[in-house]
Image (cartoon, coloured by chain):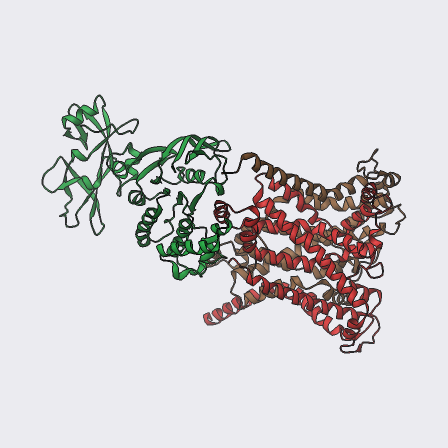
Amino acid sequence: MSENFIKHNLKIKKIEPIIYLLPVIIIYSIFMFWPIIQNIYLSTLSWNMVSPNKVFVGFKNYLQIFTDPEFPLLLRNTFIYVIIMMVFNFIIPYLIAYVLARLIKNAAHFYRSLLFFPSLLSLAVAAIVFMWLLTPLGGPIAELFKSIGIVPPNWFKSRGYVLVALSIITAWRCFGFNLIIFIGAILDVPDELIEAAKIEKASSWTIFWRIVRPLTSSAALYVFIITFVFGLQYVFTPIHMLTQGGPNQESTNLIYVVYQYGFKFFQSGKAAAVAIISLIIFLIVIVIQKRLEKSVFYAN
Amino acid sequence: MQTNPSKKKNKEFFWHVLLLALVVITFYPLLFMFFASLKTNNELFRSGLNIFPTSPTFQNFLLVFTKQPVLQFIGNSLVIALIVTFAKLITSILTSYALVFMNVKYKEAIFYIFTITMFVPFSVIMIPNYLTINKFLLMDSLLGVALPQLADAMGIFRIRQAMRQIPKSLVEAARIDKVNHFTAMVRIVIPLVRSSIVAMGIIFFINSWNEFIWPMLILKSREKSTITIALQYFLNSEGGSAWGSSMALATIATLVPLFLYLISQRQIISTFLQSGLKE
Amino acid sequence: MNEIIFKNVYKNYGHVEVIKDLNLTIPSGLRLVLLGPSGCGKTTILRMIAGLEEITSGDLFMGGTRVNDLEPGDRNVSMVFQNYALYPHMTIEDNILFGLQVAKVPKSEQQEQLYWALEILELTPYVKRYPKELSGGQRQRVALCRSLVKKSPYLLLDEPLSNLDAQLRTSARAELVKIHEVYNPTFVYVTHDQVEAMTIGHKIVVLDKSIIQQFDVPDNIYNKPNNVFVAKFIGSPSMNIIEAPIEGESIIIDGIRVKVPTNWREKVGERSKIKFGVRPEHVILDTTHGDLKLKSDFVENHGNRKCISFRFGSQQLMATTEPEFNFSEDLYLKIPWQRIHFFDNESNINIGYPN
């Protein structure tokens, strides 16, 4: 009787953790892991998501995408989005975080509370507000341009300008979040190291470049990755609300085009293929960045 | 021997000017939105750079509430956000507890796999999940929106981080007293990580409230819309009749995150301050 | 030349006054130790010299110049931090040379200074390693090396040995003195360890609650403490301080009248109560005769000596003897009048010594 009791208990002990992990495992299996596999499978089909006919076409979708004259445009747009967002969501918050964390004595909390707030807003709200802010028909930015003699562009209908406008909307919303992460990392650098450098008469820039930057490189890597990965996804909302990828696909990117192929042109196979391509590109970028960061010190 | 005190003060003054300018630039769109919601459409097209309304009016808000079932939108957003928030909290707590305080084989690998999923772009799972929800006959339903969002890798990451601060010996002492894991979790661990849980809860709620893409895909009928996707309904009248009312709706949509931020700002910010570093 | 002078210096943190009316002159080239318990202000004083803490009011002079408003980088000081402040992402070489690189010293001169300093501290084989590969003692020497290579006229050290094992500390102390004698900077050293203070300092400043209790050479701190605080802080085990009434010619200890020699009696004067101080190592124990007969309550064997504790009333007296001492429960104590100290019962100040 007692031997069975012990065996029973041991069994419970083994199963118990699994019970705790089960909900997440189930949810993620159904809505994350299985979909990834499903997507890979989808990318080999020619299917409009409705008809019972699913035709297996192998790599045809991928070939179609690579030879599509639209593909270079997609890459170019994606690249430009990333560059602009890197400036506003990586470089600038890094520097501002340094100022807030180390270069001013008072009011740092005040500034960071205010600057963080837009990160809690919906991109849909941001999109619609900026739409009116930038409208050439009497919006304040247009008036500002006019007052200094520049013709205000029609942001969302002009090639090039549309990428800038959409990037700025996304960057405006993401800035505060990245700022806080950088502030946290910079504050973690031991005060003594900074004081020791001050005693050696190092300038604020030298301290930033030679001490703070290397010692916050793991946070910088994290921000880089989320700016890249999430930035491209976040810009989906403003694109969808304001331009639907236009004018003439000038504002679509590798993420949004999946929606277009899937839900506008009903070519789900092609959509899935682009998704897989972008996944691979993301992985490559992340791996390259990680290798680069290993050469800068991981202070652990 | 060079420095004088005024040089140091000048430097700080410069930074403060810069930071204030940054704050103004950052807040301008929000102020614009708020004040625009109080202007008539005519005034909006003629205001130019003047941000303040000459005679504030609530007609935009009235228009919004009468032309659209705004309360319904708010209700829908609320229901989805509540379901998602509670589900995410419960799953994150259970998973984190198991990974920190129980003997799980390959717990590092499991954790790693979950965190990696954070970087899978939405475009990869978008269509398959759409098809799945369709198959479950949950298209155009609030549950269909909430279902794929019952767990969150970032939640697991942060709550696990908070639980790791608690010495394992606390739970071990309880186990020696024959307290089972569930009771230990509820009565010892959860109270000690309460502030992280609250902060994550608020973040989950706000994120769900602000969500656009997934609700847009799943919800087709107007009565089921959330307040966030309802903003689209004011885009078509680009001719201008929707300026004031769209700003009014945007202001309403912003009130919830604003309110939550005002009451929990310190917790939210401190959650993200101790972050980013992994491995 | 390179003296440091504090004149009426105050420091406040908000409304809290941390340093009150500090007046201190540190002569050029002196090895000065700031000694005291935690929270006594010694580190604050050191950091004020470095320029890492602001002075609320008063003047700080270094080498004749008023430096209150000078940035740390402009004061030409070197500092060794308690946790060494080595940059974990740089090699030992880069750590040591960082200051010279910032000052744009020519590379050849940099290397010269680098290897000169490495030789003195015997760190040459580690020059290309990283801090995490070195032991605690080695890291501490790297921190010293970094200060040495600058040859700045002021060398500030904030409890540099507190993170080392006991054995390492002895050799490290000798090394610090050696460094000082290489180029004789004005050397300000903060510690709570009185052995370090006594062995390293030319002069010691004993601090309690940011008030200077005594500023003197080690011998005087030990043999002529200004007050009860200093008396008890230096020496291990600490000096016995016994509160005792004085009646007529005698002092009464544990109910026993002990005659006080005339020269001391004159010094005591009108007082009816006194604090009587004698170091455990100066107490003379005997098994057969003495001034007092006391009952011991425990003995500690320290290997090189025995510490015996006596209790009477609410007070305790410790005595140390050679290890072979024949111990019995009842022992006689003889008071070594030439080695005792009297402190005023109210003010705790040393009343002085007869001629």
Position of the N terminus of chain C, as image quadrant, is top left
Q: Residue at x 14, y 46 (%)?
A: C328
Q: Is residue A59 above or below residue B147?
A: below
How many numbered circles are shown?
0
Apparent colour of chain A: red
Residue B105 horizontal/vertical position (percent): 53, 68
Residue at image location 73% in from the left, 70% down from the top: A39
In which quadrant is the C terminus of chain C drawn?
Answer: top left
- Where's residue C297, x and y in %? 21, 43
Q: Colour of chain C?
A: green
* Closest to the observer, B58 or A85: A85
- In this orientation, does residue C318 appear? no
Closest to the observer: B241 or C100?
Answer: C100
Describe residue C219's horizontal placement relative to residue B259 as left or right: left
User: Is residue B93 toward the left or the right of residue B177 in the image?
Assistant: right
Q: Position of residue B251 (x, y in %)?
A: 77, 44
Q: Does residue C82 lie above or below C206 as drawn?
A: below
Towards the viewer: C198 or C73: C73
Q: C101 above or below B17?
A: below
Report the residue at 78% width, 62% height from top: B138
Q: Which chain is brown?
A: B
Q: Residue furthest top?
A: C270
Question: How far across and how far down the image is residue C14, in percent?
Answer: 51, 33
Which image quadrant is residue C207 in?
A: top left
